[in-house]
Amino acid sequence: WRPDCVEKYVANGEPLLDGNICESYGAQAWVPNVEMKPYDECNWAGIQCVSDKLVQVINLNHFTNVYGQLPEELSFFQQSLWGLITGDNYDMSTGYWLPWTIPSFLTQLTELRVLDLANTLTGFQANEGVLGTLPWSIDGFQNLLYFDISSNKYTGTIPAAIGRIPYLQIFNCDYNNLIGPIPRELLMLTQLQEIRARNNFLSGWFPSQPSETLTYLDIGGNFFSGIIPTTLSRLSHLDFSKNRFSGLIPSALAEFSQLTTLRGSSNKLVGTVPTELMLLSSLKTLALEDNELSGTIADGFCDLRDSGVLETLMIDCDEVICSCCTNCGPTPSSGRSIVGT
């Protein structure tokens, strides 16, 4: 670990850290003064400690010139560290990244609640074939609540072992190269609230496993097929756009009483838009363009739009009749869409 930009803290007129004062973000990296004993790391930028001087959070987000390997010495904080945030740490001059494969020793951090490894592979070298995988020992994070690996180049499948992280609430794996299905075990977690898996290569049928806690599901930009899942009735946000879902739009979606966003664009859906969806009194976005729908949009949808409840209504205007949709524009692939705002 070699952070080059260093904050110069002062105590009694003497610097505790040697180096240059960071110009951006003000003190976003640190190197201890070798003559200072003991090190007072609780005063370093990006470090938060509990009252007894135990390191509780390491936040490297937006640090300048932080690169190399995550040191195994982090495992020394296994009784205190509950937050590790690496951020988009990239050294433009050398091309070094923080590691893209999650080190196995991180599972020794048994008190970890937040693990944010997002954007560790950003920048112009992110497309040069540097790949990593998720370890099968991922279930070692027994107290983890928030797990973010988005915007990297992780390959392979999502391990079923993620279903053995009992308190997991948010899992974000957007913008990777992951393949295979969403593990059924993930949906079985009793405290899971959000799954963000956008823009991967995930495929298969989405699990029919019901969840009493999941409120946010974004699986857009994958290769899921089959029918739209209807067992997740607590959802407020559902985005399955740009997949291969087929068949009718289930009228059972009207039972998703908290739904505010429903995006199913660019699939292979057929039939009509169910009138039952008008019962979704909180619905603000309904986007179903670039499918194979037909028929007529019920006037009730127009009433919702005119009242300001339904802010966005998108549908294929060449195939579907809608009396209140007057603004047509191109869809991502074919045909035209009608957008009501």
Image (spheres, helix red, strand yellow):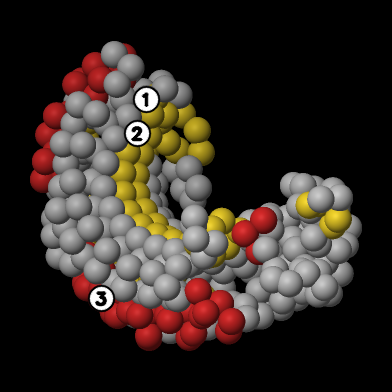
Of the image marks 1 and 3, the number of the one nearer the N terminus: 3
Of the image marks 2 and 1, the number of the one nearer the N terminus: 2
x and y percentages locating residue 321 in the rendered image: 28, 29
Instruction: Please identify, in this view, whether the residue under mark 3 or under mark 2 is nearer the observer.
Output: 3
Reply above or below: 120 against 196.
Answer: below
- Separation of marks 3 and 2 at Cα, in angstroms: 34 Å
x and y percentages locating residue 29 in the rendered image: 74, 61
Q: Residue 78 is drawn in which quadrant? A: bottom left
- What secondary structure is marked by label 1? loop
Q: Which residue is mark 2?
A: 285
Q: Which residue is mark 1?
A: 311
x and y percentages locating residue 268 in the rendered image: 31, 56
Residue at x 24% of width, y 38% of height? 259
Q: Residues within 10 Å of mark 2 (few under 14, many from 20)?
A: many
Q: Amino acid at mark 2?
A: Thr
Residue 161 in view in this figure = yes
Residue at x 69% of width, y 71% of height? 38
Residue nearest the observer in this picture, 90 or 311: 90
Q: Residue 130 is drawn in which quadrant? A: bottom right
Q: Amino acid at mark 1?
A: Glu
Residue at x 24% of width, y 53% of height? 214
Instruction: Please identify, in this view, whether the residue under mark 1 or under mark 3 is nearer the observer.
Output: 3
Of the image marks 3 and 2, the number of the one nearer the N terminus: 3
Residue 164 is tagged as 3
- Separation of marks 2 and 1 at Cα, in angstroms: 6 Å
For the residues labelled 2 and 1, say whether their Cβ atoms are less than 8 Å apart.
Answer: yes
Q: Amino acid at mark 3?
A: Arg
Q: Is residue 341 left or right of residue 301?
A: right
